[in-house]
Amino acid sequence: MEETVSKLGERLKRVRLEQGLTLRDLGLRAQVSAGTIQKIEAGRLVPSVEIFVKVTKALRRRASFFLGDEDGAADVRVIRREARKSFDAGARIKIESIAETLREPKMEGYLITVPKRARSGRPLGFSGEILFFCNKGSVDFFVRGKKEVLRQGDSIHFKAAIPHRFQNNGPIVAELLVVWSPA
């Protein structure tokens, strides 16, 4: 995981500099402090889901760019369990990338592990469409202020621009499969 955090920071800094942005510029654009961005770039801070989404959106890059292997774009990928890239996204939530970058990608895939009583943070909204499939446990989703309980085998699909959040109020660790199409 340390390698993923280090690569995340390196790529974030590279893209920021390529776009001619200072730490302050990116901080203002992403609504995140310049100090937080500096810590992420240095590999001293693993961003929460909320901050990660804000920064990737501000840089106009796909989340998979920062977590994946952009140098080896291919038409077919097999990702072995032990080779998944992952990071902890605050509140003990673990996000694993289960889809490596393809040539001209149209979607991203993640496996999110949500411990008991953990929550995703403030409601977020971003571009594209998103699908959450509850693979294990149960998760409360809040979309447009309405609560939907997803149990094992349930899914929820919506426009990602609609602010949303989730939390695990169930008795066991929950697991969500996420498919996001940013376009």
Image (cartoon, rainbow, N blue to C red):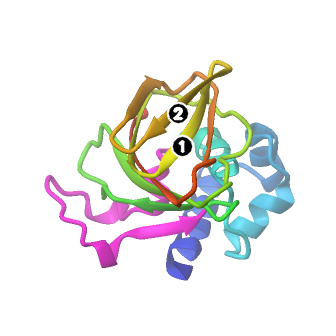
**Residue 149, which numbered label?**
2
On the rendered structure, is 44 left or right of 170?
right
Q: Earlier in the sequence, mark 2 or mark 1?
A: 1
Crowding at dot 1, Cα within 10 Å, few <14 / some 14-19 / many 20+, comes out as many
| Residue 153 drawn above or below residue 64 | above
Mark identifier at residue 160:
none
Q: What are the residue bounds of the magenta stretch?
A: 61-88
Residue type at mark 2 is Val
In space, the residues marked 2 and 1 are separated at their CA atoms by 6 Å
Residue name at image x 67 percent, y 55 percent: 118
Q: Quadrant of residue 82?
A: bottom left
Whether residue 77 is visible to the viewer of this picture, yes or no, is yes
Of 59 and 109, nearer the camera is 109
Residue at horizontal 36 percent and vertical 49 percent from the top? 109
The spot of residue 9 in percent (x, y) is 62, 68
* Residue 32 in the image, given as x and y percentages of width and height: 80, 47
| Callout 2–callout 1 Cβ contact below 8 Å | yes
**x, y percent for residue 40:** 70, 66
Tell me the quarter of the image containing the C terminus. Answer: top left
- Which residue has dot 1 on it? 139
Q: Residue sitting at 46 percent across and 52 percent down?
A: 137
Residue 158 vs residue 61, the one in the foreground: 158
Element on which disc 1 rests? strand
Q: Total number of numbered labels?
A: 2
Badge 2: few (under 14), some or many (20 or more) residues near its Cα, within 10 Å? Answer: some
